[in-house]
Image (cartoon, grey):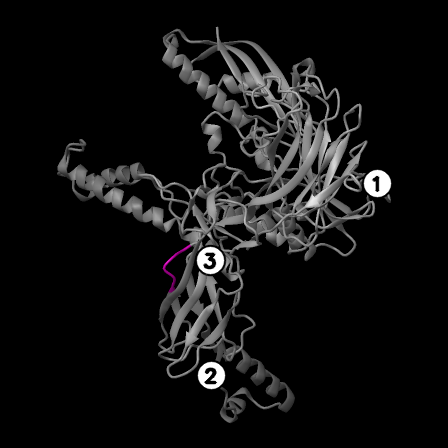
Amino acid sequence: MTIEFEFLPKLPKSNLDDRTFKDLVDECILRIPRYCPEWTNYNPGDPGITLVELFAWLTDQMMVRFNQVPRRNFVVFLEMLGIRLLPAAPAQTELTFYLSSALPHTYEIPAGREVATIRTETEEAIVFSTDETLRIGQPEITHLLSARTAETTPTVLRDRLTNLWTRHNDNWEGRAQSIFEEHPQPGNCFYLVFSPEQPISGNVLAIKLRGEAATSTGINPDTPPRHWEAWNGQYWQSILLQESDDSTRGFSFSDTGQPPAPNTVAEADVVLHLPQEFPVTYFAAYQGRWLRCVYTLPMGTQSGYTYSPQLISICARSIGGTVNASQCNLVLDELIGKSDGTPGQKFQLQNTSILPREPGEYILISPPGGLAEIWSEVNDFADSSPSDRHYRIDSLTGEVQFGFLIREPAQMREEVQLRGRIQVTGESITQVREQAHFVQEMERQYGAIPPKGSLIRMVAYRTGGGRQGNVTSGSLRIPKTAIPYVERVINHVPARNGADAESLEDAVMRVPRILRTRDRAVTPEDFETLALQAGRGAVSRVCCPPRANDETTRGIVDLLIVPQANTDSINRAEGINPAQFALNLALQAQILSYLDQRRLLGVHVQLREPEYVGVAVQAEVGLEPEYNNPHAQQAIIRSLQVALYRFLNPLTGGLDGKGWQFGASVYPSDIVSLFQKTTGVRFLGTILLFELRRQDSTWTRSLAPNNIINPGTLGLICSWADSELRSSHAITVI
């Protein structure tokens, strides 16, 4: 493979010998009349020509290696600059543990619990490990409040518990009361405030509601117009995972859709997945952890609540919890080797692709007859003294290195001192050399050397990472060890941010940006480059748009972040759902922490998601006569759909295949040009473009004005298959 350095001037290529196999054979044949005139048969079947071709092939292989010398030089230059290839980055997701039953006490699931995918005949199981301890508490409802409108910061609230309901254990009950206004209007809501004493962040709650079974509330129980939310400290986050988790069916308590018996009281659960960031908040003289249910606008022609549902009791219990997890395997107490007492010793861990070390992951040196010593890891030995117990780990290869000894000739220093004495004393150089006694060699030890015979152990480390860790939702189901009281575990969100180890070609593109930014964020290009570095493979693209130069925006830098996503679904003609490009809190904190150390004082960085605009193509194509059979037509239609999902994509789209350009519109001519590259397509018929735009938490599909989709200045085009939204590409053969 040839590497082209776009950041360098167009210098002549360093091809030390550009002769090809054919050139070598032709040159040998031309020399035959001179050195062996009696040889006259130059046909390929001649044994002599066969030998000529054999040695020409061997020479050609030697030249291939010879021409790689410049590549090796480039690697050496990277090493001299202290540049290392980045190791693989682990994928991250959220694991939800469901208990077999509610427990009467707070339950903890320790960090490091491993959950894997199903192992098949062709694929190994992919293991994820929890990053922190999960605490499943005992939720305690302290307040039931209602409001006319759903405000971001509630101000006017009505207490529904005072003098109306009484508390029995954890259950609040009393006479029937409305949860919305007497004549419900969209925006009516009620709040549940939980005690700040209980650790319920990330818990899965089952809210048990009792009320009068009433299908006459006027709603469609299959799609009730209400929305469950929780305050995560920044905004109201949706916490109802799926409609089937609401057994009350929008407070109608209708399981069969048949009219209930008069005065029938029913009870049912609403299962809610609380956010992991669920802080104690003070709103309108009430303090606690807040969640609410909001009456929303009905969809389409469906009707809303004709009157408010009535409740007579409410209580809550924890049935599980959610915790962050990363793709990794934990290795404990690995014996690396025994020291021979020489400088620069190197040892190899049993695994490669070592993840960044966390507290408790270090090397332990046990000298003969002495106490074990904890040594510290450093990036390099530049600042290590002979007594510093330092070591270095290559995360990519798993190689461990200890301090080394450098012997440097002192000729330059000797010559400087000689010239100085000659200038001061006026003596001849011969006299000075006779009188001087200089050290001919200098030695310096960088870092301590483990004593001879010491046992070297890696107490713990984690290995993993790579794109294979970006598993789909629902893939992680198999606990590696039994967990008491846990019935099942699953990942409700797909794993993201997994990236393969950096290749030399990737480093070629990264190093010039490092040299240009000097690890400081000043210009917009600096912020884009450093944000990519901060993501460590989890960030695919970054855009720093210009801001208006006024006092309100001065000192603020906006960054549009496009996270990395698994592109395998493109080949399955499914595209990539914009939900996979969501900028999660962990990635935001990682990027901001990295930039805070490199930005100028007074500069504030804001991370945002681009405005994603979906594209659905409806096209008619005519095929060549030889493809006039059902199987060939289906194959061509599928290839066209895959091409569309790849072309209209933030990661692989655009003319250069590096992602659709920010703010670039989609024209029918783009689709025509793309289809003309497909074998079997003879002509094209009508091409219609439909755009999908997000409105709050829903998407709306409409025909593009003038058949052109403009995503806006900072918008980004994407496409994905969804039968409910009709977002997939429809191609008809004519």
Verify CB contact (< 8 Å) between mark 1 and mark 2.
no
Q: Main secondary structure of the magenta part?
A: loop
Seen in the image, is 414 located left or right of residue 400? right
- Type of amino acid at the residue the image marks with label 3: Ser
Q: Which residue is mark 1?
A: 155
Q: Which residue is mark 2?
A: 440
Compute the Cα span from label 1 to label 2.
82 Å
- Type of amino acid at the residue the image marks with label 2: Gln
Q: Which residue is mark 3?
A: 395
Position in image of residue 646 (x %, y %): 52, 28
- Is disc 1 surrounded by few (<14), some (14 to 19) or many (20+) residues within 10 Å? few
The secondary element bearing badge 3 is classed as loop
The secondary element bearing badge 2 is classed as loop
Task: Give the residues in magenta.
Answer: 348-352
Position in image of residue 412 (x %, y %): 53, 77
Confirm whether residue 417 shows in the render.
Answer: yes
